[in-house]
Image (cartoon, rainbow, N blue to C red):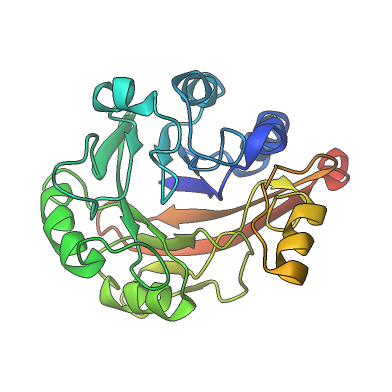
């Protein structure tokens, strides 16, 4: 099974990048399943039902979320009806939506599990123990599972990779928006990358307009962050899995810019 995961889609520029790049990405990699992180898709804050529908219409098979899950309040009206979208599983048990799901594309079945870190982020249930419970359920349906660990600290993300080595097919980090260079297949067969990176404005600061972010750093005063405009870049990973064992056979980073798309 070939699984493509595309990092945090940021605002309208990120959505444009995804729409324009998907045909070329499909042509080159021929993925069976495409998953994206959509927690910044609506102006950098959360996601809407209309945006989720756009993604699915473009051929995305599943969406993961993160700390901005609830920023668009209309999500409470539809999240329980959309099993292809998962929010962090270690949110409160009272939270609507689901934290894991099995995505079926033809004869392929991929489990997706979303978790959120606790270091430098709001408190939630333990992501490690939560992973144990969800993997036990997912593995009854499929050996192939992708985990999106939406976390701030690199140490926490790396710890999750080792904790799930041999139990998840893919463990990738999101949230920090900068693609790391530590892609590898761990000893027990789990493909790992500390952070996949983002899809959106390449000349912003983590996707936001430079001036507001610089103002906050220089003055220490609050600033309203707005998604930047201009050229885009897209980051993701492509993993090849052995369906019988769930082990990853190959992991490749994806790094694409608006300029390089024509030569892709």
Relative to 172, 202 lies left or right = right
Quarter residue 231 falls in: top right
Q: Position of residue 144 (x, y in %)?
A: 29, 51
Q: Position of residue 217 (x, y in %)?
A: 72, 69
Give the total of numbered labels. Answer: 0
Q: Note whether 259 is above or below 74 in the view shown.
A: below
Q: Position of residue 40 (x, y in %)?
A: 55, 42
Q: Residue at x 18, y 60 (%)?
A: 130
Quarter residue 86 falls in: top left
Q: Residue at x 21, y 40 (%)?
A: 95
Relative to 79, 10 lies left or right = right
Q: Position of residue 218 (x, y in %)?
A: 77, 70
Q: Nearer the viewer, residue 217 or 235?
A: 217
* Residue 160 is at least partly visible in this image: yes
* Residue 203 is at least partly visible in this image: no
Relative to 196, 32 lies left or right = left
Q: Note whether 221 is above or below 261 in the view shown.
A: below
Q: Note whether 58 is above or below 260 in the view shown.
A: above
Question: Which quadrant holds the C terminus?
Answer: top right
Quarter residue 205 falls in: bottom right
Q: Nearer the viewer, residue 16 or 211?
A: 211
Q: Nearer the viewer, residue 173 or 5?
A: 173
Q: Residue at x 23, y 53 (%)?
A: 143
Q: Note whether 68 is above or below 216 in the view shown.
A: above
């Amino acid at each position: 099974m070939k699984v493509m995961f595309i990092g945090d889609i940021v605002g309208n520029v990120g959505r444009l990048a995804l729409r324009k790049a998907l045909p070329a990405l499909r042509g080159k990699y021929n993925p069976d399943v495409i998953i994206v992180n959509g927690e910044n898709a609506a102006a950098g804050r959360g996601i809407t039902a209309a945006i989720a529908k756009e993604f699915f219409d473009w051929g995305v098979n599943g969406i993961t979320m993160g700390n901005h899950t609830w920023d668009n309040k209309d999500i409470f009206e539809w999240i329980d009806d959309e099993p292809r979208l998962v929010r962090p599983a270690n949110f409160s048990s009272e939270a609507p939506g689901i934290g894991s799901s099995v995505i079926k594309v033809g004869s392929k079945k991929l489990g997706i599990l979303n978790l959120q870190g606790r270091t430098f982020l709001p408190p939630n249930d333990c992501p490690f123990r939560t992973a144990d419970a969800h993997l036990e359920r997912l593995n009854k349906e499929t050996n192939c599972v992708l985990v999106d660990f939406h976390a701030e600290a690199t140490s926490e993300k790396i710890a999750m990779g080792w904790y799930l080595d041999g139990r998840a097919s893919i463990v990738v980090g999101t949230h920090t928006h900068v693609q790391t260079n530590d892609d590898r297949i761990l000893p027990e067969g789990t493909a790992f990358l500390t952070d996949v990176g983002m899809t959106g404005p390449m000349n912003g600061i983590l996707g936001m307009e430079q001036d507001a972010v610089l103002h906050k750093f220089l003055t220490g005063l609050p600033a309203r962050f707005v998604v930047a405009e201009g050229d885009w870049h897209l980051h993701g990973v492509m993993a090849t899995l052995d369906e019988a064992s769930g082990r990853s056979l190959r992991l490749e980073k994806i790094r694409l810019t608006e300029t390089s798309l024509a030569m892709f």
